[in-house]
Image (cartoon, rainbow, N blue to C red):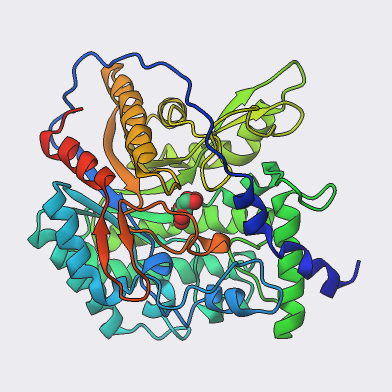
Amino acid sequence: MQKGATFALGIGLGERLLASAGKPPLSGELTPAASPKFPPKFLWGAATAAHQVEGNNVNSDNWLLERAPNTMYKEPSEDACDHYHLYEQDINQLADLGFNAYRFSIEWARIEPEKGFFSRAELEHYRRMLEACHKRGLTPLVTYSHFTLPRWFAYQGAWENPESVDLFARYCEKVTAHLGDLIAYAATFNEPDIPFLFHWINLPNAPAGMDLAGIMAAQKAGLRQYLNAPQFSSFLIGDAEKSRENMMAAHTKAKAAIKSAKNIPVGLTLAMEDDQPEGPDSRSAEKQADVYAPWLKLAKQDDFIGVQTYTRSRIASKALPPPQGAELTQMGYEFYPESLEHTIRLAAKETGVPVIVTENGVATEDDTRRVEYIRRALHGVKRCIDDGIGVRGYIHWSLLDNFEWIFGYTPKFGLIAVDRETQKRTVKPSAIALGKIAKANSL
Ligand code: BGC
C-alpha cells in the first residue's frame, strides 16, 4: 500500500466512534462499603494535562500532528482552555469546591524548546502554579511527560531513539532541581503502556484487519512523508516495542535523577482496562502479559502506582464490543465504573506499592451520569480500602472539559464546563457532589 493512502486511514475516526454512543438503562447492584469514611489525609483531586488545557503548545509534536493533512485529529487544540493564563482561577475553584489535590503535567516542549536550552521563564511559570496550589492547600501531583514532546525530540525519533533515555533523565533532573521543593508526588510518564494497548483495541468500522496500532503506524508513515523527516516519531504513533524498551530505561534513569535533586515519591501511571475473560479461547491473560505486566513489574521498585481506568474490556479471541443494550459513553465505551475497583486490586496485588487513582471519569453530556459514575467508582475504592489495600487518593479526570486528543473538544470529561469562545467556566453539579465528598472525606 502507498504511504499517502495509508495516511488517510484515520480520517473521521473520532466521528465514527462518537456516532456509536447511546444511553440504554443502567444495570448492576452496589454492595455498600462498611463505613463511609475514607482514611485521614486521603487525596481528593482532579487532573489535567498540559497540552489538553494550556493552549498554544506550538513547540510540541502534537501541534504538528493536529495540523498535518489527513490528520486523524478531529480539530486542532488551539487556545484549549487557556489554563496557561487562567491556572490561578482554576486552582482556586478546585480548592473552593473542597478538593485537597491537583494533578497536572508540565510541558517538556515549553521547558526545553531547543535541545539543551532550558527556559528559566517557563520553569518559573510552573513554579507559580505550584505555589498557587500550596497557597490553597492543594497537594500537587506532577506528571513530567503526558504524551506530548518537544518537536526537536520528535524529529530525532522520539522514544524510538535510544538517546531519549538520557535526554529525558536530564530534563527530569533540571525540572526537579527547580521545582522539586514544591512537588508532592512525581510521575515520570502518563500511561506509557498505551502503544501496546492499541494492539487490543478494534475500532468499530476500522479498515479490515486493522487495530488502533495499525492505524497509528499508518499515520506515522504519512507524517514522515509529509514532513520529509524520515526519523520523525511521537509517543502515540511510535513503534511500541522500541519505545517501550527506551521508556522503561528512561523511567528508571529519570527516577534516580529526580531523587538526586529532591527525594520525593516517584512513580508512573498506567492505562488499565478491566479485562474480563470471555469463553475458553480468551486471550485475556495474553493481553495482561503484553500490556501491563512489564510496567507493573517495574513499578514494584517505585513509591506508588497511578491507576487510570475508564471501562472494562471483555476478551475472547479478541476484544469484544460492549454488550448489546449496554449504556455507552461519548467515547463509545461501556459505562462501567466498577472497572476502578478491579484495576486497583490488580495493580496493588502485582506491585505491592501504594495506589493512587490518578485518573477515572466518564465522557458524557449528561452530568447526572457523571455523578452516578463517581458514586459507584468510589464505593469500589472504599471496598478496596476496607480490604486493607493502600489506596492513597482519588483524582478525577478531568477538572475541565478539554482537548480529548483525536476526538477534539467533543467528549465532555470535565467537572467544570468551558466556553471556548469566552473561556468562561461553569461548575457542574458533579463537581459540587465530588467536592462535598472530598470535604467530608466520606461517601
Ligand atoms: C489520558 C488522558 C485522556 C483520558 C480520557 C487517559 O488515557 O491520560 O489524557 O484525556 O484518558 O480519554
Label count reads: 0
Instruction: Decide if residue 428 is on the left or right side of residue 8.
Output: left
The spot of residue 432 in percent (x, y) is 20, 45
Instruction: Decide if residue 366 is on the left or right side of residue 155.
Output: left
Instruction: Decide if residue 39 is on the left or right side of residue 14.
Output: left
Q: Is 297 situated above or below 323?
A: below
Q: Viewer-proximal residue, 423 or 212? A: 423
Q: Is 327 situated above or below 405?
A: above
x 32%, y 37%: residue: 371
x 29%, y 50%: residue: 46
Q: Is 423 situated above or below 199?
A: below
The spot of residue 139 in percent (x, y) is 18, 52
Q: Viewer-proximal residue, 201 or 408? A: 408
x 61%, y 40%: residue: 291
Image quarter in which the C terminus is found: top left
The spot of residue 91 in percent (x, y) is 19, 61
Q: Is 239 situated above or below 166?
A: above
Residue 145 in sight in this render: yes
The spot of residue 349 in percent (x, y) is 43, 25
